[in-house]
Image (cartoon, rainbow, N blue to C red):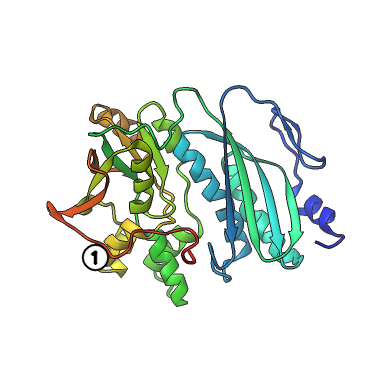
Amino acid sequence: MSQDEFQIIDRYFTRPIEDQDVLLGIGDDAAVLQVNGPVVITTDTLVEEVHFPDTLSGDALGYRALAVNLSDLAAMGAEPRWCTLALTLPSADDIWIEKFAEGFFNLADRYGVSLIGGDLVRGPLTVTVQLVGTGQTGHLMTRSGAQVGDNIYVTGSLGDSAAGLALLGEGKNDASAAHQALKNRFLRPSPRVAEGLALGGLASAAIDISDGLLADLGHLCDSSRCGAVIDVEQLPLSAELLALFRLEAAQTFALSGGDDYELCFTASPAQARAIEQALELLETKVHLIGQLTEEPGVVCRRAGEPFRTTSRGYAHFEHGH
């Protein structure tokens, strides 16, 4: 980066931190935190033309870079607290940087996250966020705690984000409410942080849906050494998705599309009412979509019959996302 690196950091990314557990923030060789109890750490890197199109605005990218990390902590049942930001920029464009910081801090403020450090260099547009959270022993969720016979649930609706990305790729300037809703699900996903905290102690395992339901549920099953059966007709599909796509296309988006950042979690059938009550308090819809089985692999069925989809979800290093 140019000699203005420190000016950029000072101007756009240095803000007063009210969190008393931050002993030292931006401006030194490293940040210093005072932490009691379990610490949960996640890192995500977003690369232009791999994880987002080059047409994505600065504020949308700033928002998205933090949102994907918040979703990871949500899946663990952890409370987000602090983050670092490594930003690689092709040039020091003040207007773009200001927009990026605006999108980033809008979401950070909403979830009480303090930016405590990072890095700024010149190169192809790349954003890396490391997010640190805290959790309670016995309430943190992992991918490996599921049991055969557990119910499989998802929050919200599935497929909207992948459909929105497809619409963005077509470049249509359709201003209809359905088009805008689907595009916004990709541009500004809502991490399920409160839901993750509410599910601690109720869910047996959890994962956020970033690579697609089939792929991510497959990861959970692998970690828990079990399989799954999904009833395709139980997949939650939004009215907007069904307004613009045929049912089978909508179901394929829901199974394989990715980028929904909803939670997929499992729980004993005995917890069914407690889960409904916990998420009702948050006004979050939750949907029972299947059960875990002894037979390895994720199997889809529709009306009791086998259902096959052509895509199994996003695979890292295989193609752009």
The answer to whether residue 32 is above or below residue 209 is above
Quadrant housing residue 159: bottom left
- Residue 312 % position (x, y): 34, 59
Circle count: 1
Foreground pick, 29 / 63: 29
Quadrant housing residue 89: bottom right
Label 1: element kind: helix
Q: At 60% across and 37% down in the image, what residue appears?
A: 132
The answer to whether residue 193 is above or below residue 37 is below
- Residue 218 % position (x, y): 34, 47
The residue carrying pointer 1 sits among few (fewer than 14), some (14 to 19) or many (20 or more) residues within 10 Å by Cα, namely few
Q: At 45% across and 39% down in the image, what residue appears?
A: 75
- Residue 111 % position (x, y): 56, 40
Image quarter hosting the N terminus: bottom right
Is residue 285 shown to the viewer in this render? Answer: no
Q: At 42% across and 71% down in the image, what residue appears?
A: 167
Foreground pick, 75 / 219: 219
Is residue 53 shown to the viewer in this render? Answer: yes
Q: At 38% across and 65% down in the image, what residue appears?
A: 163
Disc 1: which residue = 248
